[in-house]
Amino acid sequence: MLTNPDIDIVYIGNVHSFRRQTVTKCLMANKNLLVEKPFACSLADGEYLISLAKERNLFIMEGMWTRFFPAVQKARDLMMGSASQESVLGEISKVYSDFNFYAPDNEEYPTSFFYNRKLGGGASFLVAPYPIAAATLCFKNPPESIKVVGQKDEATGVDIQGAMIISFPPTGTTHDGKCPKLPGYVGHLIIGYLVM
């Protein structure tokens, strides 16, 4: 596949711990990439992959498909304004965002990939990208600070839950809660999404 000149872009959705190796191989074969979340298992890996893609003039993006839902794009336009309309909410001051499920209902404990740290299991990699992405859609600038607490499973070493506060300039703080709820100075908007 990597030597096929008719393939322009590759989707990477393998086990998290093999992302850097697989993505590097594809970039070295001059393939543009859509990489499933999490994009990488460490900041160093993420920076390396982005740098390599830039160096080779290739497209690379995390596969956060919910950002492209028409409803999500419309909600962002309502929050942030767009070329055709101003924000209807005013400045966003808080976002509450959450994603969770009861893993033992779906995965065998402790043998599932979900509980295997070496393979990239744990809540940070499996579910945290969704509420973080939902929260960051509400602000134009990158965060100023991030504070995180969590709980690890003693037997497996993976994180099984976490909470974070992300502070954005000039105001605005996100905090994991139930469903993104956006209190602005003009009103508020609640965004719901289906968890399957």
Image (cartoon, grey):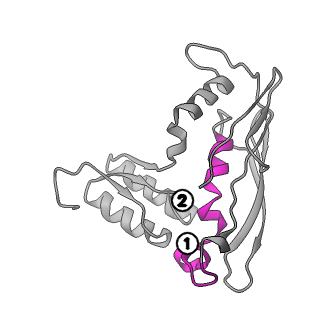
Q: How many numbered marks does the figure carry?
A: 2
Task: Classify mark 2: residues with Cα within 10 Å, few (<14), some (14-19) or many (20+).
Answer: many
Question: What kind of element bears circle 2?
Answer: loop
Give amino acid for label 2.
Pro
Secondary structure beneath disc 1?
Answer: loop
Question: Which residue extends farthest bottom?
Answer: 155
Task: State yes or no: discs 1 and 2 in contact (Cβ < 8 Å).
Answer: yes
Could you say where residue 124 lies in the image, as x and y percent from the top left? 65, 64
Residue 133 locus on image (x, y percent) = 62, 46
Give yes or no for residue 75 being in the magenta stretch: no
Q: Tell me where the magenta segment starts and ends, as one range.
A: 108-136
Which residue was labeled with disc 1? 120
Q: Position of residue 167 (x, y in %)?
A: 77, 44
Tell me which label, 1 or 2, sits earlier in the chain: 2
Residue 143 higher or lower than 49, as above or below: above
Image-based side of 75 in relation to 90, left or right: left
Q: Furthest residue to the top?
A: 84
The quarter of the image holding the C terminus is: bottom right
Q: Position of residue 53 (x, y in %)?
A: 38, 52
